Image (cartoon, rainbow, N blue to C red):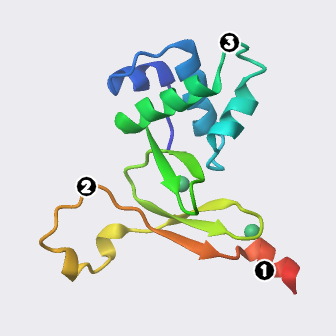
Amino acid sequence: MKIDNIDSYLREKDVKPSYQRTKIFQYILDNHNHPTVNQIYEALTDKIPTLSKTTVYNTLNLFIEKKLVEIITIEGNEARYDIYNPNDHAHFKCQLCKNLFDIHLDFSKMSLKELEDYKINEQHIHFIGICPECAKKQI
Ligand SMILES: [Zn+2]
Ligand SMILES: [Zn+2]
């Protein structure tokens, strides 16, 4: 997803673009590795000495509420964050390198007969296994 002006994008979504919010959003946008709260905090704390983990956490919750960011929980209570992407995609979590990969998946092409009478507000699909890189190393 390409966003030219983060300030106006945040405003569009009804979020006041403070310096910290802009930086946190920028980080998730630039680092498409699905960072955790800790990774975001560690990466930004040098540049923003006033930043606290609570601020990162609260900002992410606001972003989730405003559909700027989505939270991905695949295993246990490990929460990772991703730019909210209306073009649905699934995730693949590698059990060896712990990376989280985006898998392009057109949800509209899936046959969901059993869901016909349900109103879907959110859909999350994820796979867990071994990624191609790690599979190569195992041989
Ligand atoms: Zn892997
Ligand atoms: Zn993703």
- Badge 2 marks a residue whose secondary structure is loop
Inter-mark Cα distance, 1 to 3: 42 Å
Q: Say whether disc 1 or disc 3 marks the residue closer to the N-terminus.
A: 3
Quadrant in which the C terminus appears: bottom right
Is the Cβ of the residue at disc 3 closer than 8 Å to that at disc 2? no
Q: Is ligand 1 within 8 Å of the beta carbon of the residue shown at mark 1? A: yes
- Amino acid bearing label 1: Ala
Query: Residue placed farthest to the left in the image?
Result: 117
Inter-mark Cα distance, 3 to 2: 36 Å
Q: Say whether disc 2 or disc 1 marks the residue closer to the N-terminus.
A: 2
Disc on res. 121: 2
The location of residue 72, given as percent across then percent down, is 51, 53
Q: Quadrant of ligand 2?
A: bottom right
Q: Nearer the viewer, mark 2 or mark 1?
A: 2
- Badge 1 marks a residue whose secondary structure is helix
Residue marked by disc 3: 50
Give the residue drawn at x 23%, y 61%: 120
Residue marked by disc 1: 135
